[in-house]
Image (tube, helix red, strand yellow):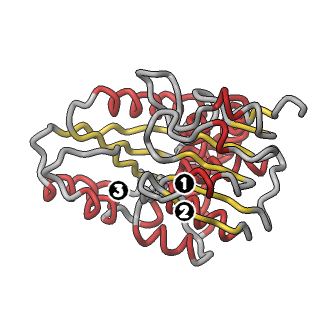
Amino acid sequence: MTEPLMLDGRTLARSIEDSLRERVTTIRQAHDDWAPVLATVLVGGDPASATYVKMKINACGRVGIGSRKIALPDTTTTEELLAAITALNDDPAVTGILLQHPVPKQIDERACFDSIAIEKDVDGVTCLGFGRMTMGERAFGSATPAGIMRMLDHYNIAIEGKRAVVVGRSPILGKPLAMMLLNRNATVTICHSRTEALSDIVREADIVVGAVGRPRFIKGDWIKRGAVVVDAGYHPAEGVGDVDVEAAMRHCSAYTPVPGGVGPMTIAMLLTHTVEAAEARDAS
């Protein structure tokens, strides 16, 4: 078997940023130097969340998108967070809103996600956005699944008619990705950590997506010869994803590295959606 193709998210994300930089310049020229603005809302002091927000703000700067960081304390209530999001919804200068997950446990996270205006839901976290995307209507899909789809298309990975197995059912990754694949005419099975005979199901897949949140949970010998492996997990302490990629490479035809595969594409799609939101506002 030939060497499997590495689906390089870093290189693709850089290319996307280059094109976004040009689109932002066009917007600036048309609006007296106004640029799209992404507002990031960070509640509490979780170091990993703070790092992710910083990465997103830095990425905005690379393409010319403005950024606004709203930092709220650990003691923030649901009502206070809802008020902060409402203010951003009402601010015409703000193009997109990102509420960093997770929020402290006293907050109703779903209520706060769903309070984001649909036209500013650039991270694709609202129930309305998920429903519209599932039904094939206009909406921003969840950023990580959208990045995966963009990467599959870029590398000409066939989707239509293929058997896809998504291992993971989170509302912002596993479920929306399954719907995106289904909308592209894949036959999709959603599995999770409690699925019986999981290895047998994975062995039937032409496309395997690891999104279960457990290090190396999907074993290399579960992968069918010639399958495409997308690892959407990342566990910094171990430096691995949800798939035992080294072992899977002996069987698969293509794979995403960890890190450097899905992660960069998440941020690239968040930026893309923020620019698209500005362009859509101009067109309306």
In the rendered image, the vertical position of residue 273 relative to residue 257, given as above or below: below
One can see residue 106 in this view: yes
State the separation of the CA atoms marked 2 and 1. Answer: 10 Å
Judge left or right: residue 4 versus residue 139.
right
Rendered image: mark on residue 228: none
Residue matched to label 2: 190
Q: Check disc 3 and report the residue beneath it.
A: 91
Q: In the image, what residue occupies the spot 53% across and 43% down?
A: 35
Residue 198 circle label: 1
Disc nearer the start of the sequence (3/2): 3
Q: In this rendered view, identify the residue nearer to me: 24 or 251.
A: 251
Vertical arrangement, residue 236 with respect to residue 109, above or below: above
Mark 2 crowd level (few <14, some 14–19, many ≥20, 10 Å Cα): some
Q: Amino acid at mark 2?
A: Ile
Residue 124 location in percent, x, y? Answer: 48, 58
As helix, strand or loop, the secondary structure at mark 2 comes to strand
Q: Nearer the viewer, mark 2 or mark 1?
A: 1
